[in-house]
Image: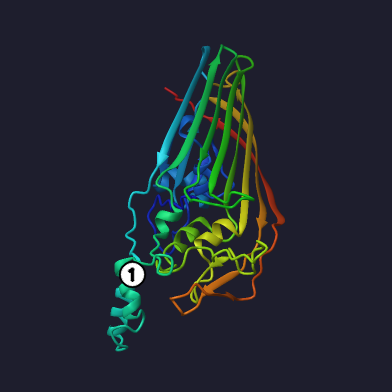
Amino acid sequence: MSRANTDLFVRGISAARSGDPLVMIDGIPTSYNSNQSLEYISPNEIESITILKDASTQAIYGIQGANGVIVVKTKRGKKGPVEIKARLDQSFQQVTTKPLMYNALQYAEFSNQAGVNDGLGPFSQFSEDIVSHYRTGDSPELYPSNNWYDKYFKDFASMQRLGVNITGGNDKVTYFSNLNFMHQGGYFNTESKDYDANPKNIWVNYRSNVDIQFNNYLSGFLRLSGNVKREHVPGGASNDATYASMFLMPPTTYEPLTPVIKDENGVELPGSGQVVVTDRVDQSTYGILNRTGYYNHTVTNISSQFGLNLDMSFLTQGLNLSGVFAYQTNSVGSLATTQNYERYIRSDNWDELEFSKKGEQNNTPLAYGKSHSYYYHLTYKGQLDYSRVFW
């Protein structure tokens, strides 16, 4: 569910040509990279897409078009009664390939085989007694066999999408408006009682195109568009790193938390219910999802265009004057709600559940922090055209 990192190459890739193509939306270049600009526009609002890659067609874009140009035209209004179209999608996402996970017995046997290959003997990593317990499964509490993928990864993640289009107009004014909403649910199993760090996305975008015919010679247009996207991710790692952490913890590791031990008064003793790691792995999947807090990343893009077109055929046939003013903003804000947690490792005595604290980390309350960046981009465009055929 993380952002799709897609690279676009219109004219191939080389050392001298490795950048993204220029993306033009309704005649105005986007002020951010092409991956983002195409990510923040929905298919419901696109009229046509044109790819320009040869020198003659992209010459008018100068050096900006050196890597090719993607020209996107959004939908316009049309004369006629008001038309309203709505579409609601409910979908379920599933991984295309489920990874193969070894159980504790397989892990112990492969580890011992690796020891044999290194000349360390047949039971250098796991003793014959431990392997026997894994084979019979007679003491799962002391000799667990965990499938971390099945424990933390859901079989399905839900996604909902809603789109509404409104179009209409008359001889003077035509309009097209589009509103889209998308919610993508998380795919991890979480247990925190204070917050939910399960990754999810919420995306809202809108577009409104209005075309006006003032008189026989003067026409104009107004284009308004924007989007808001919020990404909710765990505080301890990115989505990719959280997924990868499931493959770092051996299946022989004790359950994600140390046993809860209470005194005669029913008070939990220190070290009870703390996150278990190993001597080589400092971050467990459970700790990332339930003991590190979360981040909210909010990206807001707003774009507006205003243009006028003057048909100057009253002076000479084929003469036309046009001008466009465009204003684009990009705002990125992050809310960090993070905390740290204690780590414990199990002792080498596999016949007992004994744990000791690892490192200097302590359980901390949720701490809040904010960051924000903002920029805007102005585009002015004036154009005088003269096109006429003389016989």
The reply, left or right, for residue 12 in relation to residue 162 is left
Residue 142 in which image quadrant: bottom left
The reply, left or right, for residue 385 in relation to residue 373 is left
Residue position for label 1: 134
x, y (%) of residue 128?
Answer: 31, 80
Quadrant in which the C terminus appears: top left
Q: How is the image coloured?
A: rainbow
x, y (%) of residue 236?
Answer: 58, 61
Q: Determine whether the residue tagged by mark 1 lies in a helix, strand or loop.
A: helix
Residue 14 in which image quadrant: bottom left
Asked if one can make out residue 237 in the rendered structure from this viewpoint, the answer is no
| Callout count | 1
Q: Is residue 105 above or below residue 193?
A: below
**Residue closer to the observer: 367 or 365:** 365
- Amino acid at dot 1: Tyr
Q: Is residue 82 above or below residue 104?
A: above
x, y (%) of residue 22?
Answer: 50, 47
Residue drawn at (46%, 58%) of the image? 243
Asked if one can make out residue 295 in the rendered structure from this viewpoint, the answer is yes
x, y (%) of residue 78?
Answer: 51, 17
Tell which residue pokes out farthest to the front in this image. 264
Within-10-Å neighbours for mark 1: few <14, some 14–19, many 20+: many
**Residue closer to the observer: 241 or 30:** 241
The reply, left or right, for residue 135 in relation to residue 261 is left
